[in-house]
Image: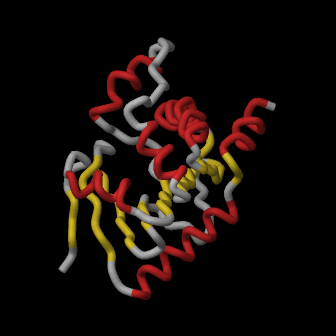
Amino acid sequence: MTRWITTSRDPAWAALFTGYTRSAYRLEGQQTYNSPSEQEDFARFLAGEPIDLSFEWMRPKITAQIAAGRTQTTVRVVVEPQTDYTRFEMAMYPEFVAMGEDIRIISVEEGEWPEGIPRHDYWLFDDRDVWRMHYREDYSFAGAELLEGEAVIAEYLQWRDTAIERSVPLNDYLAGRRG
């Protein structure tokens, strides 16, 4: 039986981010997201106004996981030229790196996609729990689906390893874009 979480406010969803014991990994490939919690900051960003990048509500959760020896890694596929939303994320990502998250980038030109990497987002917790992310046409979160089976997990682990191998650390990517 397939297990779904249909809202990011579901306590079961929040528990995934505090319940892992070794590693949390995310492949992020969608170029635009529509999250109600970000709409105000995103509008400010687009208007060239300052946004709050402190993430003080999140800092204790991430730093506690890192202090406990757990890793949190995101590989972000960035299609160039960047969408407005991707530029918004790039403004926020350094704060997450400062908290201890390993954010890595795979940059591709428009119309391309990195070989061996799926075109959908997912989370992988402790190398065993795969949650495929689903989004609506308006880029809003539609739900996360727990995928099961040894072959499925092996495929997602391979995708993770390929993505990490082909990616560069966020700071290297940002330094290259500035130069």
Q: Which residue is painted at 48% across and 58% down in the image?
A: 26
Numbered disc total? 0
Residue 108 appears in view:
no
Q: Which residue is painted at 44% across and 30% down in the image?
A: 55
Is the N terminus in the top left, top right, bottom left or bottom right quadrant? bottom left
Is the C terminus in the top left, top right, bottom left or bottom right quadrant? top right
Residue 134 as seen in the image, left or right of residue 1: right
Residue situated in front as seen by the camera: 122 or 69: 69
In the depicted structure, whether residue 88 falls above or below residue 135: above
Q: Which residue is painted at 21% across and 75% down in the image?
A: 2
Residue 95 as seen in the image, left or right of residue 136: right
Residue 15 % position (x, y): 29, 56
Residue 114 as seen in the image, left or right of residue 40: right
Residue 135 % position (x, y): 31, 52
Residue 60 % position (x, y): 43, 39
Residue 174 % position (x, y): 70, 37
Q: In the figure, residue 95 lies in which quadrant?
A: top right
Residue 127 appears in view:
yes
Q: In the figure, residue 40 lies in which quadrant?
A: top left
Q: Residue furthest right?
A: 179
Q: Which residue lies furthest to the bottom in this view?
A: 150
In the depicted structure, whether residue 157 falls above or below residue 9: below
Q: Which residue is painted at 28% across and 66% down in the image?
A: 145
Residue situated in front as seen by the camera: 43 or 51: 51
In the depicted structure, whether residue 47 falls above or below residue 72: above
In the rendered view, how is the structure colored? secondary structure
